[in-house]
Image: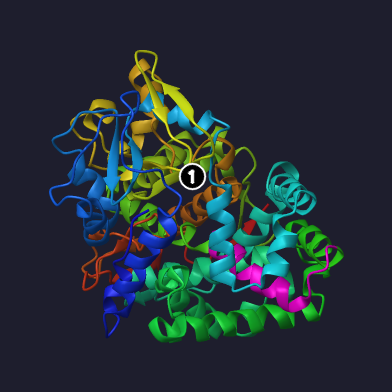
Amino acid sequence: MALIEAMSRQANGYVVAAALLFILVYGYRQLLLAKVDPREPPVLKPRTPFIGHIIGLLKHQHSYYKILFKNASAPICTLPMLNGKGYVITDPELTLAAFRSRNLSLGPLISEMIHRITGLPDSCMEIYNSAAFHTQWNKIVHSTLTGEQLRIINVAGLRDLARTLNAVPPQGLDVADLYLWTRSTMTMATTSALYGDENPWKKDPSLMEEYWGFESYMLAIIANVLPNVVAPKAIKSRNRLRAGFKRYFSASGDQSPSTHSFMKQRGNLERSSGLTDDDMAALEVVVVHGALSNTIPTSFWFLVHVFSCPDLVQSLREELQHIVRLGDGPREMVIDITRMEERCPLLVSSFRESHRLSSVGTSIRRVMQDTVLSDGKRSYLLREGCFVHVPMSVIHVATESWGADAESFSGPRFLNLSEESKQQKRVYFPFGGGRHACPGRHFASAESWGFLVILLMGFEVTGVDGGPIRVPEPKLPNMTTSIWRPLAGEDTRAKITRRQGWEDVVWKIL
C-alpha cells in the first residue's frame, strides 16, 4: 500500500513517520518471509535493498508503479519489502483473473479502514463485521442503487444541481476556481440526494469544508500513530462531521419522506442491530466519503476535458437534443435521464475517457489463501497473506492497450466497437472490479452525466479570456482516493454564462 503527498503539508515530520509505521506495522505485518518460491512472479528488486520499494511508494505514491514498469515488461512481479513481499499486476488477463478470484479479497482492508477512519469502538465493529449485518448491508446498498431506486436518487441529485444552475444570473458567473465551484456545487447535490430535505450539510454548510479538510488529512488518521498529535485538525473535523450526522439521526432525518431508501433501509438495519445514533453518525462519515471523495473530482475533470474541446462540445450538443424537450412552463426545458447511457453514446464515451485518464489509484486485494493465477500462457503462485496491487496509473495509459495517444484525451475513444476497443474495455476499471467494484458507480456516473448535460445545453463555460477552458496540470491525490486533483497554483478561473437564446431557460429533471 502506498502513501503520502497530502501529509507533506504538515508542519513537522510526524506524519511521514506515522505513514511509514503504518506500512511497516500494518500493511505487511502478516506477510511471509521474503523468500520467493520459483512458482511466484519474478522479483523486481529495489535499488536500495529491503526498503527501496517502501521509500519509492512514500515518495512517488501512485506514480511509483509507472516508474517501476517504465523499463520492465513483466505482466506480474513480486516486490520484496523488508521481510515481506507484495505482487503488482499490469497484465489485462491476470487483472481479470485477480478480480474474479474468490481467494483475493478487499474485505479485511475495508473493515480495518472503517475502524480507523470512524474511531468506532471494537463492540460496534463486531456488529459491522458480523455475517448477518454485513450480508444485509450489502443487499441494501446494491438493491437501492440500481433500477428504479437508482433513477430516484439520480433525479434528486440532479434537481438540486438544476436549482443551482437556474440561479446563474443573466450576466453570468465569474468563477475564481472552477474546481472549488464544482466541488461545492456537486457536494451539495450529492448530499441532498442521499439525505433528503433534512440534509445536515444544507442546514450547516460549514460541514462541507469540514469534510474536505478531513479528507485531505485522512491518511494520518488511518496510520493511527498519535493521530491527535499528527492530525489534530482532521480529528476536529471528523468530530464535527460526526456531530452533524448525530443531529440528523437523532431527529430521524433518515426516515423523513424525502429521504432515499438507501438511507432509510440502512438506518433501520443499524438501529435494529444495536448501533446508537452516535455510532451511526460515525459510520456515516465513511459512507459520505465514499460518495464524495472520487465522484467530485471526476466531475471536474469531465467538465474541463469536454469544454477544452470546442468541436466535441458542438457534437455533444447535437447528440443531447434527443433528451431535452420543452416543458409545461414558459421557457421550461426538461431533461429526461432515462436510458441516458443508451441514448447519449458520445457523452458516455467522453466521460469514460476522462475517467480513464484521471483515475490513477490502485486496486488492492489480500491473498486469503495460496492461489494460482493464469493468463492462459503461464501460471503464478500467490502466497497467503500477501497484498496484490493493480495500478490504474499504469494500466489505464498503457500504449499496448490504448495506442500511441494513450495519455491524451479523445472523447470518442469508447465509441469504437472494434476488437481493439474490446481489449481496451478489458483494461478499464476506474470503479474497481469483480465483487468489490464500487456499488455506487451507477449513481456517480449518472450524476456527472447530468451535470454536463445541463452545462452543455444551457451554458458556455470558458476561460476568462472567452476562449476554451484550459485543462490544468494534475497532481496525484493522497492514497485514500484515486482521482487527480488540479495542481496547486494552476489557473482554474472560468466564466459561466448562459448560451445565446437560452438566457431565461429554467431546467427541470425527470
Magenta stretch mostly in which secondary structure? Answer: helix
Q: Which residues are magenta?
A: 273-291
Q: Quadrant of residue 199?
A: bottom right
Q: Residue 310 in magenta?
A: no
Q: Residue at x 36, y 72 (%)?
A: 18
Residue positioned 20% across, 29% down in the render: 73
Say whether residue 416 is visible: no
| Left or right, residue 196 beside residue 103 | right
Disc tally is 1
Q: Is residue 191 above or below residue 242?
A: above
Q: Which residue is painted at 39% across and 67% down in the image?
A: 497
Relative horizontal placement of residue 468, taking residue 121 as reference (left or right) = left
Other-residue count near label 1 (Cα within 10 Å), few / some / many at <14 / 14–19 / ≥20? many
Q: Is residue 150 above or below residue 17?
A: above
Residue where numbered disc 1 is placed? 431
Residue 243 locus on image (x, y percent) = 65, 84
Is residue 461 in view?
yes
Q: Position of residue 421 (x, y in %)?
A: 36, 23
Three-letter code, disc 1 = Phe
Label 1: which secondary element: loop
Residue positioned 21% across, 68% down in the render: 465
Q: Position of residue 343 (x, y in %)?
A: 55, 34
Determine whether, in the image, residue 124 is placed left or right of residue 48: right
Looking at the image, the residue that sits furthest to the right is 272
Report which quarter residue 300 is drawn in. Answer: bottom left
Q: Name the colour scheme.
A: rainbow
**Foreground residue among 191 and 137:** 137
Closer to the camera, 475 or 127?
A: 127
Is 119 or 260 nearer to us in this picture?
Answer: 119
Quadrant in the picture for residue 93? top left
